[in-house]
Amino acid sequence: MNFKIIYITISIFISLLSSKTILREQNDARTIIKKEFSQNRNNESIIEIDFESNTDDWYQDSSNGWQLTTESYSSPTYSYNSPDDNNSGELTTHSLYSEQITLPNLVDGEILQYSFSLNCNMPDFSQEDNPFTPGVDESLYLADYYIVSVRDVNESAWHISDYNSILNNGNNWWCGNEEDNGYLDNWYQYLDTPEITIGTNAILTADMKWAIEDFNNVNVAGTCADGWDQANVQISIDNGMTWTVIEGDDPYDFQCGYGSLSNGFDGMPGWGDIQDWHNVSFDLSNYANQTIKIRFAFYSDVGWSVGDDASLTGLQIDNIEISDEDTQYFFNDADNNSGINAMTTSGSSWVDQLYDYCDTDRPGYLSWDTYNAGDAFDGNTLMDLSSFAGKNIQFRFQTLYDGNHYNNQVENAQGNGLYIDDINIYKKSTFNPIAPSGVTGYLNSNNVYILWNDLNVSGTGDFIYDNGIFSPDHFIVLDEIQNQDAWAGTEIYTAGTSIVDSIYIYVFGAFDGKIAGFSSFGSNYNVEPDYEDELSILLLNENFELDLSEHAWVGIDVNNWTFYGSFIIAQSLSENYAVGYDPTSIPSSQSKIFLGNNWSNWADIVPTLNDPLISDGEWGIRAKLNYSSPEVTYNIYRDGILIDSGLENFEYQDDTVESGNTYTYNISALYPNGDESPLSESFTITISECDIAESGCSCDTCNSGNCIYDCGLNCIDFYNSEGQLFYLPYINNNNCDDGEDGEYDLTCNEFLNDGLDCIVDLDIDNNNIPNAFSLGQNIPNPFNPYTTIPFSVAQLSNVELKIFNALGQEVYKKSFPNLSPGNYTHQWDAKHMNSGVYIYTLRTNSGIYLKEKMLLIK
C-alpha cells in the first residue's frame, strides 16, 4: 500500500463526556435505520411476561394513569395501557412498576438483553413553538413521550465513604455512585435516623456538602418547577409514615424542585448548585417532647447528572447531631455506625434505559411492534441488563403527557396512549457468529454440488473495500449531518481472532481527531469504542510546508487492537476535518456511520440527507490485519432440514435428489464454543424432467435448435459447413482441457465460427437457459490464490471479462467470442497478485456491463 510519509502524533484518548439535554429532544439524527432483528438460535429466553396470568405484583403511582386492558394486545388477551386523556394543560407523569424480577448470573461470553411489545398512539409528540422565546425553538422538544427505566431493588446510593471527607479525614455519608463519582438520573434517596425522643429545645446540626445541578433557566411547561435536582431535610413524627420538609439556617434555593416532581412526588423545596462543607442547623422546638425521625433526602430528575457534568458528585453528610443544652439525643459521624446510632438507607436508584415517542419512524407507531436492541436512539440502545445479573430488578414504564392535544404536524393529536405487552428477558452470546457466504451450486450426473466461501482462513492482509478513487469533491464533515457525536466506520468481517496491525485513512490537508475500533456485541456493534487513539496529522509539501490542497493515504500503527469476529474501524467526524469516500464503490457494503446513538448503513443514511453533493461510497478507511482461522465446521440444510453436519470442507455433494423437484440449501457454521451461526443465504436449484437426447438430434444433424446430451464430454467443437451449423462431441481431444460429466444444452444455430474452434477455459454448469445476463460472486471469497467467477449469458454474445486492482489498473483480461446462452464459470489464478480488493467486470457487445468485488488475502 502506497502512502506519503507524514508526521503523526498519537496519544491515548480518554473518553469525553457527552452532553445531555435538559428537555427531551426529538431524534435529530435525520433518520436512524432500524436494524432488522434476527432471533439468534443461541438466545435463551429467561423471563417472559405477557400479563395473561397474575399481575397482582404490578402497581402504579398515585396518578392512576395505567390500566390492564383487553382493548388491544400483542398476545391474547391483556396488555397495559396508559390512556392519553390529560386535558388539564398541566404536565402529568404516570408510572407503572413491574413485579420484582430475579435475574440469573452470567458466565463469560454471555449478556442479558430484553425486548417488549408496544403500540404507540401518542400523536402529540412535539411541543408548540413559543413566539415569545425567539432564541429557542420549542417544537424541537417532546410533548408526549415515554421512558423505560430499571432499578436494582436492593441498591441504595447512600453509603459510608471517605470520598471528599472533611479535611480529608475520616468517613462521611455519601449519596453517590462510586463507579461514576456522582449521582445519576431518576434517583430518590433517603438517609434516615432511628426514632428519637427529644426534649423541648432540641437542635439538629449536620455538616453538609453538595454538588448538584444548578437551578438556572428552569422552565417545565405545566409545572411549578423552579429548580432541577435537589436535596432537603425532612422530619416524621409517625415513624416514617409521613414526612415534612424542614428548613434550617441555610435557606433552600427554590420551592418546587423538578427532582421531586419527576419522581412522582409533590414539588418540594430544595438546595441545588455546588456548596462545600458547611454546618447547617435546624430548630426542632416545634416538635418538643415528641418521638421523631430525621431524613436527609436527595432527588434527581430525568435529564442531567454526573454523566453530563463530572462535577455533580451528589450529597454528603457528616457529624449528624440532635441535642439541646443538656442532652445529646443522637450522634453519627459515619465512623461509629452501630446500635442506637445506626442510620438506615432506602429509596430508589432508577437507571434510565431509553426514552421515545410516537412518530412514523419510531417503533410501534399506531400498531403493535417489538422494541428490540438497537431500536432506541438514546440511552441503553443495546437494552443490555448484564450489569444487573444476579440481582433483583424492577422495570418502570412512564408516560408523560403535556396536558393538551395539539401538534401541527398531524391532523388529530388525540390518541389512545401507550400500550405495552410481552416483556422478554433473554441470555445471548456476546459473540456474533458469522454465517458462510457465497453459497452456490450446480447439477452434475444426478448429484447437486453445493459450494461456499471457506471461513477457515488465516494469514496477514490488507482489508480494502474501496476502489481507490478519492478526490476533494467527495467527503463529509460533521455540520453536514448535524450531529455532535459521530463516527464514519468500515465494517470488517472476520470469523476468528483478528489483530489490527495498522490503519490507513485518506486525509485531505490535515486531520485532528480520533481513530477507534468497535467490537461486535451480539448481533449489534458497541456504541463505545474498545480502542481509541487521538491523531494530529499535517500534510506537508516538498518544502515541508502545510498544504491543505494535498490529499493522501496516511498509515497509523496501532497497538495490537484485538477482536473476535466482525468489528468496525472508525474515524471521528468533526466540523473542521473531512472524511473522504470513494463514490465509485457503490452501493457501499461496508460503510457504517454512527450518529450519536446507533450504527447505521451509510448507504441508507445518504438518501435522507437530501444533499446532491453527498453520495454513497466506501469510506477512505483500510486496515492491515493478522487473522486466524476460527476452526469452524459446517452444517448443511436442505429445505430447512439438517441433512449433514460436522463438515470440514467447504463443498458438499447431495446424491439423494430426484428430477422434477426444487431444492433450497443453506449452510451454517458451528464454532468451537458451541455457537451456531445464522443460516447463510439460500441457494435454490430445480431439477427438470428431460430426455437424454431430443428426437431427431444426432451428432451430425440438428433439426431443432437445441440438443441435450447426458454424457461425459471433454469439449464441444462447432463448425460451419456450406451454410449449415453442426457440432461434434470430442472425447479426450488434445485441443481441449478436460471438462466434467454432466448435462449440456447446446444451441446449434447461434454459433458463427468458421472452421474448427474449441471453447476452452469455461465450464457449463447446467442446462437452465438464463433469461438475463448476470455476474455472480466469485467462489471462494476471500481467496488465495485461485477463485472461480460465475456468469450467465442470455443471448449469443461476445463476452469480455476484466479484473482491476484497487487503483483501477487492469490486471487481467479474457475474451470469449460468440458465447451461446448458458451459465458459465471461469477460474482466475492470482498467485502473482498482491493482497487486496479487486474489481471484476463483464462486458458484452450488446452493451451489458456488470461489476463485482472480490478479496485476495495472502
Image (cartoon, rainbow, N blue to C red):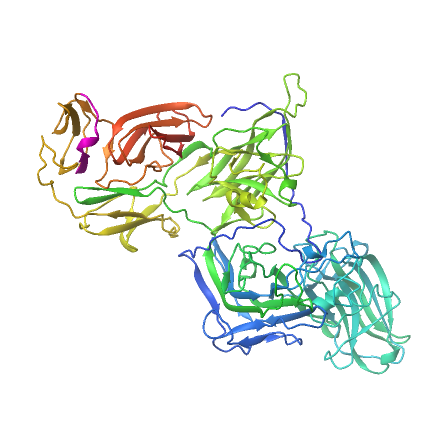
Q: Which residue is located at x 70 percent, y 66 percent? A: 262
Residue 487's image quarter? top right
420 left or right, relative to 190:
left
Taking depth in this image into account, of 834 and 177 the one nearest to the observer is 834
Up/down of 835 relative to 105, above or below: above
How many marks overall? 0
Question: Does the magenta-highlighted stretch encompass residue 678?
Answer: no
Question: Does the magenta-highlighted stretch encompass residue 753?
Answer: yes
549 left or right, relative to 36:
right
Up/down of 606 relative to 418, above or below: above
Taking depth in this image into account, of 343 and 299 the one nearest to the observer is 299
252 left or right, relative to 12:
right
Check the picture and name the quadrant holding the C terminus.
Answer: top left
Up/down of 315 relative to 490, above or below: below
Magenta stretch bounds: 742-754
356 left or right, relative to 423:
right
- Residue with the most extreme top position: 543
Q: Position of residue 576 (x, y in %)?
A: 67, 35
Q: Position of residue 243 (x, y in %)?
A: 76, 76
Q: Position of residue 840 (x, y in %)?
A: 38, 30
Q: Position of residue 836 (x, y in %)?
A: 43, 30
Taking depth in this image into account, of 467 and 655 the one nearest to the observer is 467
Q: Is residue 858 visible?
A: no
Up/down of 28 relative to 763, above or below: below
Q: Is residue 705 visible?
A: yes
